[in-house]
Amino acid sequence: MKKISILGSTGSIGTQALEVAQMHPDRFRVVALTARQSRERLFEQVRQFRPEMAGFSEPIPTEEIPEDLRFCRWLMGPEALHAAAAEVEADQVLVSIVGIAGLRSVMDAIGAGRQVLLANKEALVTGGHLVMKAAEQAGRPILPVDSEHSAIFQCLQAAGPNRPVRLWLTASGGPFRTWKKEDMDRATREQALKHPNWSMGAKITVDSASMFNKALEIMEARWLFDMPPERIRVVIHPQSVLHSAVEFEDGAVLGQMGVPDMRVPIALSMAWPERIANGSRPLNPFGMNLTFEEGDPVKFPALRLAGECLRAGGAACTVLNGANEVAVAAFLENRIPFGGISRVVEAVLEKTAGLRADSLGDIFEADGLARARAWEMIGKGTNGWFCP
Ligand code: NAD
Ligand code: MG
């Protein structure tokens, strides 16, 4: 029986992890659940899974917790995340919150000797060097939940002592793959939120449309698999059946295929090294037409910026991430057009070069600065400024 703590349990990844836990009551016991604010959903989950601890990272008055849920220890604010990551006795901690907030939780969980199941790619984007070092010292590899990284992780199991020469990171291309750049730059919130293959939270769905999600995943892969950016190839594969692949010296390419269903990598991380049923459909290969294209770095500046930031080092990836989080929030509030997202990120990167990332403090400082600069630019800019 594995005890699992879930940070961000009301989100897309969190709820799917609970579905898997519910399918295997003999394997998993849920010991902690946290959410940012979706009250009714968390209350319902606590009622159903009866964890020892639960909490909201945005505090609510304790009087508002229903009577029948007071059996569980309720915590609020940063304390809730800290307890779920490091205090509650758990074998594994699924970090499925959004944004740089995940970095502290991942470090807390590693520090407490927990097995980290990592959905929150931002932790590696911003603090990859610190996270990987801490995980190595703790002797527990990070188990990736992101589907591409889970695929690569699985392929590497077959590599023995051989190192891959290249990683193939697949990308669906998102809803704007076939659009002209001018049309994409003016796309609406509704258009950007329509992902062709995956149903996910709003932030990552917009990131998939702009390909900033792939930029973050290049950074994630760089740290998880210790691979320089020039050896990570983005392959646009609109059907999302090949989830990623690794290429070896002898020309062999090993890939992992399956239906696009996040319960597969989530369940694999939870049950690792075992594979368990998770409710996904079997893959039907007949009539399938799999295609592969190159990504266009002019249309999607994110693809170029990923390599540039990794080569620049220091806090460049943190700055990209922070500016992008702000730009996506502004886009979702209809304050900037879709094309404004990469403009804000590039402008903030230009203004914020050369920052260090030697400690968590440095990283949070760089993040704060990038966010402040992004909001400042958005405040000053008109839609005309962003989309001439
Ligand atoms: P989501 O928005 O659906 O859910 C996020 C969850 O975390 C919610 O429970 C929310 O209440 C909580 N949360 C959000 N921000 C928080 C904060 N600052 N502090 C504390 N709690 C917070 O998001 P999601 O789509 O489930 O994605 C979660 C993470 O997993 C992201 O890092 C994302 O990039 C990654 N990821 C998601 C998918 C997917 O299919 N959804 C795939 C790969 C990776
Ligand atoms: Mg992914």
Image: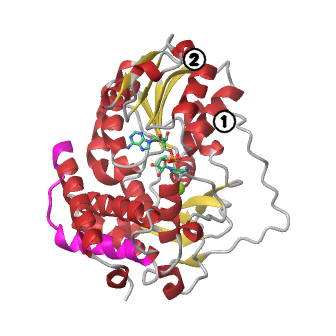
Instruction: Identify the amino acid type marked 2.
Output: Arg
The answer to which image quadrant residue 25 occupies is top right
Q: Nearer the viewer, residue 372 or 252?
A: 372
355 is within the stretch colored magenta: yes
Residue extent of the magenta highlight: 339-362
Does dot 2 land on a helix, a strand or a loop?
A: loop
Q: Which residue is mark 2?
A: 50
Characterize the local packing of mark 1: few (<14), some (14-19) or many (20 or more) Cα atoms within 10 angstroms: few
The numbered mark, 2 or 1, whose residue comes first in the sequence reads 2
Left or right? Give the position of 255 relative to 39.
Answer: right
> Would you place residue 379 above or below residue 142 in this image?
below
In the displayed structure, 194 sits above or below 81; it is below
Task: Give amino acid for label 1.
Answer: Arg
How many tags in the picture? 2
The N terminus - image quarter: top right
Return the x and y of residue 168 as percentages of the image width and height: 52, 65
Residue 268 at what x, y percent from top left? 60, 38
Mark 2 packing: few (<14 Cα in 10 Å), some, or many (20+)?
Answer: some
Q: Quadrant of residue 116?
A: top left
